[in-house]
Amino acid sequence: MRSIGCILLLAMLLACSPAARRQGGGLAAPDSLLLKAEQGDAKAQLRLGMFYDKEQHFEEAAQWYLLAARQGEAWAQNNLGVLYKDGLGVSQNYAEAAHWLTLAAEQGNTLAQNNLGWLYQNGLGVRRDYAEAQRLYRLAVAKGHAAAQNNLGTLFLHGMSLPCDTDSARYWFTQAARQGLSTARQNLLRLEGK
């Protein structure tokens, strides 16, 4: 009887431990990371957001990204912008997505430049502006971003702010396809009529 009492006491202590209290839906973040994040460390908040994002706990990810984004962490700003763009863990809000992506893009975040370019290309949360989309894509392309290469190819193919130019479209689709982007390979096949 005494050993059962000890086991119950041990189980209660474990259930009340910091690690158990920090679990979200059966998912436990590393204690050291959580402690740093709770103390306001932007990099730790970003990493914790990425941890929850990877596990598809998007509401939790958005909360941590927001804390880091408010401190100017460009990756957190991009990731939060993507959550708003896609409506994951937050209500879909293209204007809010554009806000956070702009802050990250201004810091030179390549993914944010591409993501924000896509919003401008499609007129979501911002006024449609193909020239601005092209400018942002070119910034990301200069750093070798495959999706931006593909998106720039699309602008050339459809004459969006640029003269319709299938040779330039083919060039950018090829660059992106060489990096393994399947969408670019599909665009090349369509361009070649296959």
Image (cartoon, grey):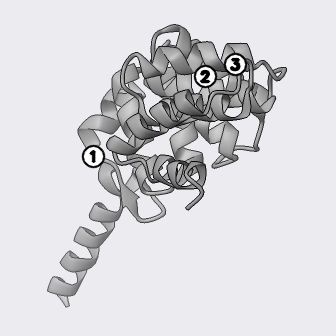
174 and 43: which one is in front? 174
Q: Counting residues from the N terminus, which is met first, the one under dot 3 or under dot 2?
A: 2
Q: Amino acid at mark 1?
A: Pro
Q: Where does the N terminus fall, quadrant-wise?
A: bottom left
Residue lying at 78% horizontally and 26% vertically, measured from the top left: 95
Q: Residues within 10 Å of mark 2 (few under 14, many from 20)?
A: many
How far across and how far down the image is residue 189, in percent? 52, 55
Location of residue 74 in the rendering, given as x and y in whole percent from the top left corner: 47, 18
User: Tag 2: residue type?
Assistant: Leu
Answer with the quarter of the image where residue 146 lies.
Answer: top left
Q: Nearer the viewer, residue 107 or 172?
A: 172
Give the label, 1 or 2, closer to the camera.
2
State yes or no: discs 1 and 2 in contact (Cβ < 8 Å). Answer: no
Question: Circle 3 is placed at which residue position?
Answer: 162
Query: Which dot marks residue 111?
Result: none
Tell me the tag on residue 30. 1
Q: Spatial distance from mark 1 to mark 2, Cα to Cα? A: 28 Å
Horizontal arrangement in the rendering, residue 110 relative to residue 8 (left or right):
right
